[in-house]
């Protein structure tokens, strides 16, 4: 059987169709999360929310509730709760480190005291793309609408905040409220991607497309559009390649996204100002 025929046959299966739909929806929203992570300089957020998601999954198993739903709620609450601790970019990263340590300790203690089988909790961290359900698609669909809508609705404020926090404050932007909203969306997005690639490989859907786009784009809008476009290409190519050669989708997506990000960084850097330069440069254009 040829690879093309194998892909065609597999695409007739409902789980494969749901997985493909999930990746397409993810590409519409999750790369924008990567743009936020890069702009706010909060790389530890992925690891922190991974641990919070594990805590939510453990709580769901203990209480007999849907583990992924509990992970979503836990991540949303954690994202909102950690924002008041962050008055500066450095403080935000420090708060994420504290959150990560507390969440993993609480999750491990809960699993140990409850006698719940930890294998089910840790399995979701690796992802199971063919186990995507309609509820997961609904979450990804909501993110695919909410994140682009937020960037259109609050383009100027986001451009200032992601450029320089102090400049945004001086310009009258409600920095604290906007930061809380962004952190909640980032946290929910990480939890929502659990079944697709697992929390450990979520960078393929969020950070790597944003890093590649940052190298190519010159403004917040262009970087965001590039991130979404790269995410679409990476998800489609990586998913079809995994089907054609019977490979695990998660690692293939990461390698594909990593190759694109590396290729983008080999492009000679232009000398025009970018939206993520120091605050002493001119205010970035939101266009």
Image (spheres, rainbow, N blue to C red):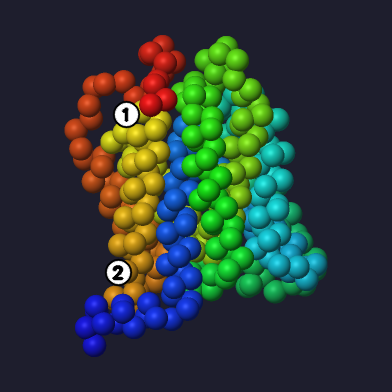
Write down the residue under mark 1. Answer: 218
Left or right of residue 36: residue 173: right
Q: Position of residue 250 (x, y in %)?
A: 42, 64
Residue 254, by quadrant, is bottom left
Q: Residues within 10 Å of mark 1 (few under 14, many from 20)?
A: many
- Give the mark toward the camera: 2 or 1: 1
| Residue depicted at 33% across the width and 49% down the height | 230
Quadrant of the snapshot with the N terminus: bottom left
In the image shown, does 255 or 19 lie closer to the viewer?
A: 19
Ranked by sequence position, the earlier of labels 2 and 1 is 1
From the top left corner, tell me how far across and down residue 154 is, in percent.
54, 30
User: Can you say whether 270 is above or below 114 in the image?
Assistant: above
Residue 93: numbered disc: none
Assign a secondary structure to mark 1.
loop
* Residue corresponding to mark 2: 241
Identify which residue, 25 or 71, lies in the foreground.
Answer: 25
**Disc 2 element:** helix
Q: Is residue 162 visible?
A: no
Left or right position of 100 against 280: right
Rendered-image quadrant of the C terminus: top left
Question: How far is disc 2 from disc 1 in space, using C-alphas?
Answer: 31 Å
Q: Residue at x 44, y 51 (%)?
A: 28
């Amino acid at each position: 059987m040829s690879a093309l025929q194998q892909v065609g046959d597999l695409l007739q299966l409902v789980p494969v169709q749901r997985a493909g739909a999930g990746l397409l929806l993810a590409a519409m929203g999750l790369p924008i999360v990567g743009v936020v992570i890069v702009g706010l300089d909060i790389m530890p957020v992925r690891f922190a929310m991974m641990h919070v998601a594990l805590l939510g999954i453990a709580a769901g198993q203990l209480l007999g509730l849907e583990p992924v739903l509990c992970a979503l709620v836990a991540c949303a609450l954690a994202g909102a709760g950690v924002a008041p601790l962050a008055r500066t970019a450095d403080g935000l990263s420090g708060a994420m480190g504290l959150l990560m340590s507390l969440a993993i300790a609480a999750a491990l203690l809960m699993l140990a005291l409850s006698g719940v089988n930890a294998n089910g909790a840790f399995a979701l961290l690796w992802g199971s793309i063919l186990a995507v359900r309609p509820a997961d698609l609904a979450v990804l669909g909501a993110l695919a609408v909410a994140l682009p809508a937020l960037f259109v609705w609050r383009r100027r404020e986001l451009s200032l905040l992601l450029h320089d926090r102090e400049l945004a404050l001086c310009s009258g932007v409600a920095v604290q409220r906007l930061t809380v909203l962004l952190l909640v969306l980032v946290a929910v997005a990480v939890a929502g991607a659990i079944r697709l690639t697992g929390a450990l490989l979520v960078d393929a859907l969020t950070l790597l497309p944003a890093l590649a786009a940052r190298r190519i784009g010159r403004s917040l809008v262009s970087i965001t559009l590039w991130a979404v476009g790269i995410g679409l290409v990476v998800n489609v190519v990586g998913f079809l390649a995994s089907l054609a050669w019977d490979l695990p989708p998660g690692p293939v997506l990461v390698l594909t996204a990593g190759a694109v990000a590396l290729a983008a960084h080999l492009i000679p850097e232009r000398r025009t100002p970018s939206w993520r330069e120091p605050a002493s440069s001119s205010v970035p254009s939101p266009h």
